[in-house]
Amino acid sequence: MRLALICRPFTFYGGVETSTAGLMGELIRRGHAIDLLSTRGQADVPGARVVRLPTIRQPSALRLIWFALAARRAVAVGHYDIVHSHERTLTQDIYRAGEGVHRAYLEAMGRRGAMLNPHHRAVCAMERRIFRLRSARHVVAISRRGKAEIERRYATAAESVTLVYNGVDLERFHPRNRSRLGKSAREALGLDADAWVVLFVGSGFERKGLAPLLEGLSRLADGRWRLVVAGKGDARFYQALAESLRVNERIRWIGLRADVESLYAAADAVALPARYEPFGNVHLEALASGVPVLTSAVAGGSEVVTHGRTGWVVTDPTGAAIAEGLTAIREGAGADTSSTARHAAESFTYARQAEAFERIYRGLGRGAWGGGRDTKSDIGGTS
């Protein structure tokens, strides 16, 4: 098939981006011709034709709409069999809801008043068009929780929303990295061999629960506990919070890292006590690396974690619940912990993810937009 894949520029840093890269690589390997419609920041991708769309930087609401219009123009002349989008646009046969439901995110973060902001209004308006199947023919959710959320909030027919879990690179993320990379990674981070290391990986510190994790750390009396914080974001508030909780000396703040596999190799557990998280590939990367995961029930990735066996799922991500969960993981760690975690991730391959999308492609037939169908924009209002 000739596919248009609409996606923001991706790197191999973040979980969402690596998942996108892995899926696209597998689709290319399976013989699909792919045009990657992205912005000028997108690097070349082996096997794909990159179509770099013109964009503007500010204001954010106009940037969103500008990109959507640019994508529509590119799609109209592309003669694609299927338009598969990971972004909210005006013309897609399939929309992968990798960011969940924006209004639900705002509510989870206590930002109901944010609908006065033009950017949030535009995002919600585009989602309304998509989830009501006015500018998409089918929606892909990346967790059971996300599928149910879309259907409940927008009355989207269940048969129009398919669950397709992300894949993970099972070679890059592997338990053998602990013996290959773990010792040197710990030394580079200044971590003692007997330290019990918890890893937080994620950009978006507030949404992913770093504040309650710091509080949880403060409740762990054993001085051997250590926390490594990796990801993009302004850490100043959290560093001040750690200082006030008197745990800053236990924490390593390392920013965004490309060699995240070495961080998993250095860790005894991974924590992602998110307030809102459609999935979180950190769950799969950690499990594939043989590392148990503490997560929250609102994270879609909790669906791949078996409570008390491959990790711990807290109903409410409070400091007390997180401390209890991390203690349980530490006390339950045994000789089979790594193999049990690894086994939980092994079925989440890019091949399985690509096969699921291919079934959707075949079911939809030729795309509605690839041949030049136009739709009128009605961006604005609230959802």
Image: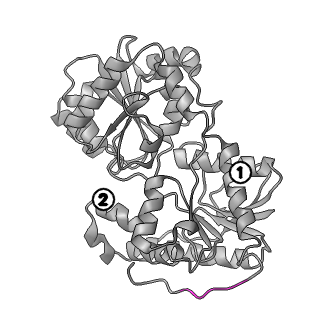
- Residue type, label 1: Glu
Residue 163 seen by the camera:
yes
Which residues are the magenta region? Answer: 373-377
Percent position of residue 326, x then y: 30, 28
- Residue type, label 2: Ala
The residue identified by callout 1 is 355
| Main SS, magenta residues | loop
Percent position of residue 114, x then y: 30, 70
Disc 1 and disc 2: Cα gap in Å?
33 Å
Identify the residue shown where x is 53% and y is 35%. 285
Element marked by disc 2: helix
Left or right of 20, for residue 243: left
Q: Does the magenta stretch include residue 296?
A: no
Q: Nearer the viewer, residue 105 or 229?
A: 105
The quarter of the rendered structure image containing the C terminus is bottom left
Q: Relative to 323, say whether 163 is above or below.
A: below
Identify the residue shown where x is 71% and y is 69%. 364
Badge number at residue 108: 2
